[in-house]
Image: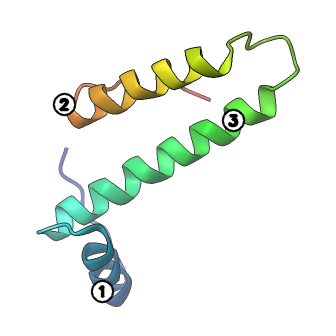
Amino acid sequence: MRITMAVDPGLLELARKLSGARSKREAVEVALREYVHRRAGEKLLELEGSGIVSMDLEELVRCRVGVLADTAAGGTTYPEW
């Protein structure tokens, strides 16, 4: 999807360098994926002990690895929180 947005050029360049991205587009995509994964993990932690999520650590790790593989392949559908 194409979008137009104003971004702090210094921040974008720093993100590009830190991520090892070769382009601005790639830097933004890497940053968005990392943000989504971090926030999704935080949401899971909020559910800990609630009885809603009943996975053990091994199941969570397998799920996480599967999501990362799907994301790398460009095929992840993200949940709506």
Residue 46 placed where, x, y %? 79, 34
* Residue situated furthest left in the rendering: 22
Tell which circle, 3 or 2, labels the residue nearer the N-terminal end: 3
The three-letter amino acid code for the residue at tag 2 is Ala
The three-letter amino acid code for the residue at tag 3 is Lys
x 19%, y 44%: residue:
1
Q: Secondary structure at mark 1?
A: helix
Residue 5 placed where, x, y %? 31, 68
- Foreground residue, 42 or 4? 42
Q: Quadrant of residue 40?
A: top right
Q: Is residue 79 visible to the viewer in this orientation of the structure?
A: no
Q: Which mark is residue 43?
A: 3
Tell which circle, 1 or 2, labels the residue nearer the N-terminal end: 1
Q: Secondary structure at mark 2?
A: loop
x 19%, y 60%: residue:
26
Q: Secondary structure at mark 3?
A: helix
How many neighbours does mark 3 have within 10 angstroms: few (below 14), some (14-19), or many (20 or more)?
few
Q: Is residue 26 left or right of residue 65?
A: left
Q: Is residue 44 above or below residue 6?
A: above
- Residue that carries the numbered disc 1 in the rendered image: 9
How many neighbours does mark 1 have within 10 angstroms: few (below 14), some (14-19), or many (20 or more)?
few
Alpha carbon separation for disc pair 3 and 2: 24 Å
Residue 74 placed where, x, y %? 21, 32
Residue 17 placed where, x, y %? 26, 79
Q: Is residue 30 above or below residue 15?
A: above
